[in-house]
Image: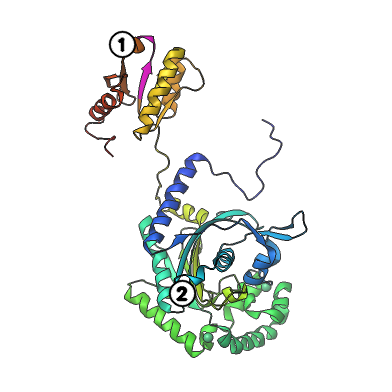
Amino acid sequence: MQLITKAPRGTKDILPIECGKWIFLENLLREESENFGFKEIRTPVFEHTELFKRTVGEDTDVVQKEMYTFSDKSGRSITLRPEGTASTARAMLENSLHNGALPIKLSYFSSCYRYEKPQAGRWREFHQFGLEIFGSQSPFADAELINTAISIFKRLGLKNIKLQINTIGCSKCRETYYDELNHYFNFYKDDLCETCLERLKTNPMRILDCKNSSCQKLIKEAPIVIEFLCKECAEHFEFLKKYLTKLQIEYVVNPRIVRGLDYYTKTVFEFVSEELGTQAVVGGGGRYDNLVSQIGGKDIPALGFGIGMERLLLILEKQGISLPSYEPCELYIASAGEEGKIKAFILANQIRQAGIKTECDIVNRTMKSQMKYADKINAKYSIAIGEDEIKDGYAMLKNMETGETRKISIGEDFISSFSKAHVELENGDALLSK
Ligand SMILES: [Zn+2]
Ligand SMILES: [Zn+2]
């Protein structure tokens, strides 16, 4: 088969059997976050480029190298969202949600786009589930957010997910810290990559995120922000640790976590799993008290958590946790002749209204090939309607697995007759009463 083109590199089709699992997973994430008061928001796939430049940060890899940015027909610079937080904060402000009751707890499922080298669990189009809390400065909010994430992992049955926390302080603590970092990296300037040399002038903390091996060596020994915290940030971190302990949430302080995006302040955290090789990050987040004001809004403190759906599915698979997909068809109504087919259509509609997944022939095939099809789609029961059945007003309900049958009426009392026989064949498993 010669296709005129294939799906672009770094993208993939999610086929029905996978979609069934995605839907199950999404519903579980929705339900669990709803338990904590989060409500869903949906924002556009594309935004004005300015939004991400300002919030994610001009000198981040995301903005410099990875964004899908283009001019639309009227010459505006448009970007496919590379992450979900900036859009959520923009939508929250633009729609004045902050004028209602605070805090606001939002959740989202977003497809995101980054021009990265495709590798295991990394796609150019990927899907993120995120949680955002707007309007609380308190470390209770940080603990609540982490707690929500942990409840989700627990409900999924995931094991060995380790929580690592850190604080990267506020602009006040960073004044002294930036001086230290500048001093340190200036000393080893010759070993820095070109991008980091630029970063040394604009935002030395950004260097801590560089993946270049020569920079990595320097980063390992670089001064850590946790030693330069202002009083407020130090207290915030102490309270968070205390609340986590009270909630019996295990954590490790990892002073090397900085998170890749510019907008983080104070708390940052990551959930790490060894399932994907060396300490892969499953999800993470943190506080970003300056993000909202950067977009041009009021000073509203905020924090969030994000998890890549593809990664989550990969870890579930590695841990042998299988998610249910679509249920197969419960009843297939095969038929012969035009009259039989019309009767099958009418019966199928009646039984669907009773909440039973039912299919009938729409290809105009022979009875024999219809039964083959019913087999292929794993239909649990079948009925065959031909001339005789129409004349008699009765047909046989067959359990496709056991071959056991029951005679049922296809007249006025079809539904009650079907239900009775169905229950009998299911050995008392009353499907209709569900
Ligand atoms: Zn501070
Ligand atoms: Zn570098």
Q: How many marks?
A: 2
Asked whether mark 1 lies closer than 8 Å to ligand 2, one says no
Name the residue nearer the viewer: 283 or 79. 79
Which residue is located at x 32 percent, y 76 percent?
A: 246
Q: Amino acid type of disc 1?
A: Asp
Q: Amino acid at mark 2?
A: Ile
Q: For numbered disc 1, what is the local secondary structure?
A: helix
Residue 392 shows which numbered tag? 1
**Quadrant occupied by the C terminus:** top left
Image coords of residue 370 (percent x, y): 45, 20
Q: Is residue 432 above or below residue 189?
A: above
Circles 1, 2 touching at the beta carbon (< 8 Å): no
* Residue 211 pos. (x, y %): 63, 68
* Residue 409 location (% of width, % of height): 28, 19
Dividing the image into 4 quarters, which one contains the N terminus?
A: top right
Image: magenta residue range: 382-388
Q: Residues within 10 Å of mark 2 (few under 14, many from 20)?
A: many
Magenta-span inclusion, residue 385: yes
Left or right for 283, reference 297? left
Question: Which residue carries the number 2 mark?
Answer: 165
Examine the structure image and report whether residue 159 is included in the region drawn in magenta.
no
From the viewer's perspective, tell me whether residue 292 is left or right of residue 214. Answer: left
Question: Looking at the image, which residue is at 62% across and 71% down?
Answer: 55
